[in-house]
Image: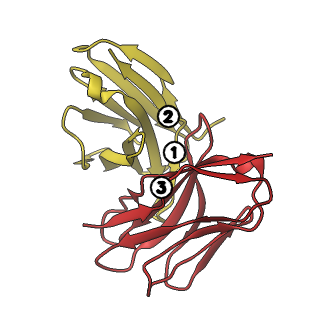
Chain colours: A red, B yellow
Amino acid sequence: GDSVTQMEGPVTLSEEAFLTINCTYTATGYPSLFWYVQYPGEGLQLLLKATKADDKGSNKGFEATYRKETTSFHLEKGSVQVSDSAVYFCALIMEGSNYKLTFGKGTLLTVNP
Amino acid sequence: DADVTQTPRNRITKTGKRIMLECSQTKGHDRMYWYRQDPGLGLRLIYYSFDVKDINKGEISDGYSVSRQAQAKFSLSLESAIPNQTALYFCATSDRINEQFFGPGTRLTVL
């Protein structure tokens, strides 16, 4: 079945450091890909998405590019802030799957001042 | 006001008790979902509903049931709670354009 694998955390960075959280997927077709963020004590929020190969999703300084050849959707940010501390989830939806999200296990990011 | 609300936000109950978690949305979406989140396991789908008359099991439906009382309301029940149902439960909604909107979660502890 479809699956998402993301780098295990926790990830601890200093403010203004560069962030990469790796995400790869396994799917029988061409999924839409998402990054969700969960701030402490809150529900998940969509951070960015990409619906086809070579699309780049971006939001709040975060970016991720849909790479079909490597089945990857790595999340990057050039300069993290303390307020970026959260759990990040990579996810996919397959067309024809009744729009069921398949999530990775999540990566906890802590940014220190 | 929040678009997706969940009640209660926290609940402690005992093994064998029946408990209901409620979800309401004001987004006008047809599709609603229940997930549970466990540390290190991400989110797993329990049940989903595409309209009032359409209910479907997710990957971990055993021990749970749901009711779609109206387009805006989707409840999750644990008929006889057990300790391994201790988790964070999320409701979500979506329209037909893939993005899902999540509620704030209910933290359930079964003693």
Whole-percent x, y for residue B77 in the image = 29, 27
The residue under label 3 is which amino acid type?
A: Glu
Under tag 1, what secondary structure? strand
- Kindly identify which numbered label has been placed on residue A8: 3
Residue B107 location, x and y as percent? 46, 27
Going 81% across and 45% down the picture, which residue do you hit? A113
Q: Which class describes the residues within 10 Å of circle 2: few (<14), some (14-19), or many (20+)?
A: many
Give the spatial CA distance, label 3 vs label 2. Answer: 23 Å
- State the image quarter where residue A2 is shown: bottom left
Name the element at disc 3: loop
Check the residue under mark 2 and report the chain it is in: B
The numbered mark at residue B105 is: 2
- Does the residue at mark 1 contact the one at mark 2 (Cβ under 8 Å)? yes
Percent across and percent down for residue A7 are: 48, 61
Question: Which residue is tagged 1?
Answer: B102
Question: Looking at numbered disc 1 in the image, what kind of residue is underneath it?
Answer: Phe
| Of B49 and B45, the residue lying toward us | B45
Secondary structure of the residue carrying numbered label 2: loop
Residue B72 visible (yes or no): no
In the displayed structure, would residue B46 be above or below residue B78? below
Circle 1 chain: B
Question: Along the horizontal axis of the image, is B69 left or right of A1?
Answer: right
Depth check, front residue: A32 or B68: A32
